[in-house]
Amino acid sequence: MSLTNEAVLSALRGVNDPELHKDLVSLNMVKYVEVADGVVNLGIELTTPACPLKDQIQKDIEKAILPLGAREVRIEWSAQVRSARGPSGQLPGVKNTIAVGAGKGGVGKSTVAVVAALGLAREGAKVGLMDADVYGPSIPKMLGIEFEKPRVRGEKILPLDAHGLKVMSMGFMIEPERAVIWRGPMVHGVIRQFLEQVDWGELDYLVIDLPPGTGDVPLTLSQSIPLTGAVVVCTPQEVALLDAIKALRMYQQLNVDILGIVENMSYFRAPDTGKEYDLFGRGGAKKAAERVGVPFLGEIPINVAIRASGDAGTPADCFDKTDPATRDGIMSFVRRLAGQVSIKSLSAAPPLELKIT
Ligand SMILES: Nc1ncnc2c1ncn2[C@@H]1O[C@H](COP(=O)(O)OP(=O)(O)OP(=O)(O)O)[C@@H](O)[C@H]1O
Ligand SMILES: [Mg+2]
């Protein structure tokens, strides 16, 4: 068989994206094909810079193309996050909106929202973080920006820039430590104001940290903007799982897609011996995910550096001061989450142009 552009392209029609289960050509992921002196140059555009299966895709491409007689396959990778929200007047520059919720308080929603946002940004995506916890906003402290105030330009509120994220929180609007008692309609008003008046600009992902429970905020959010989907955080105890399932049901009733469940405080790894202890019964969230038929996004262990970074307002420490296993756990969660968003975006994706030279 001769090594032509057409032969390469036809071979690529046989290479599936392992997550999206369609071939790279139909997915419009092949940007260009060039064959010169037995070397095949390819431009491959991933659907997220946090692609969980890039290495696998590379191997599959090589396996399909080398037998055509190629000496070498050189891939130029790029990424273009696709929107899974469909057209909407609200938040026009925001491609995807990811709500992070849980059935109960204190399971690590805010922590998970922070590591998800930061992890996606570290992979190269443009990310915003919206603290929609109107009752006890904790994002400003976790990011070390609790004493800053967002600026106003014209009619718009400008989110703060922190750690490479665009951040907005109810905490900037109220005094710290002042208890907030809101009635449903007030919550509704505040959330809508957030959505309408904050100038988020262009974002690949807007991560939204929800208050505990199944109250007014998810309701208002789901009515006000098309959510790409929700991540449900839970800890491994049986009682916590029941709450998680309650949260899943709520999202289903609200017609919000579930991107998956993540197990936080999954286990503890002793820093001195490396031994792992399953304090709360690790693995429960995975079982729950299988039972209710939603994706399992991974497990994040209990880690002192994660807790300390939240208190000190130094979120990068979740990546830079944790052990490799914890860091891998976090990044694998981030990539699986990005993968789920990509899967959802498939039907909503506009056609891209394929250039063959
Ligand atoms: N994986 C983890 N390892 C260590 N500490 C953690 C971990 N996840 C969360 N924490 C800590 O647990 C506490 C509660 O976490 P967080 O505030 O994220 O929970 P939450 O679900 O958002 O709570 P709330 O319901 O009050 O909004 C924080 O001190 C946080 O630093
Ligand atoms: Mg919180």
Image (cartoon, rainbow, N blue to C red):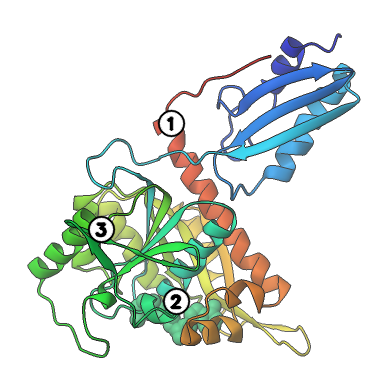
Residue 82 relative to residue 92: left or right? right
Q: Is residue 337 above or below residue 9?
A: below
SS at mark 3 in the image: loop
Quadrant the C terminus occupies? top right
Question: Can residue 203 be seen at all in this image of the molecule?
Answer: yes
Q: In this figure, which residue is indicated by the disc labeled 1?
A: 349
Q: Quadrant of the N terminus?
A: top right
The reply, left or right, for residue 10 in relation to residue 2 is left
Ligand 1 picture quarter:
bottom left
What's under tag 2, amino acid-wise?
A: Leu
- Residue type beneath disc 1: Ala
Q: Nearer the viewer, mark 1 or mark 2?
A: 2
User: In front: 214, or 187?
Assistant: 187
Q: Is residue 288 visible?
A: no
- Measuring 74% from the left and 33% from the top, which residue is drawn there? 75
Q: Residue 141 location, x and y as percent?
A: 40, 82
**Displayed quadrant of residue 73:** top right
* Mark 3 nearby-residue class (10 Å; few <14, some 14–19, many ≥20): many
Residue linked to disc 3 = 198
Q: Secondary structure at mark 1?
A: loop
Q: Residue at x 47, y 52 (%)?
A: 126
> Which quarter of the picture shows residue 107?
bottom left
Q: Residue 122: horizontal and vertical position, in percent?
A: 58, 59
Is the residue 97 above or below the residue 39 in the image? Answer: below
Name the residue rendered at 61%, 47% in the picture: 51
Residue type, mark 3 in image: Val
Residue 143 badge = 2
Question: Which residue does the image show at 18% across and 66% down from the upper left?
Answer: 216
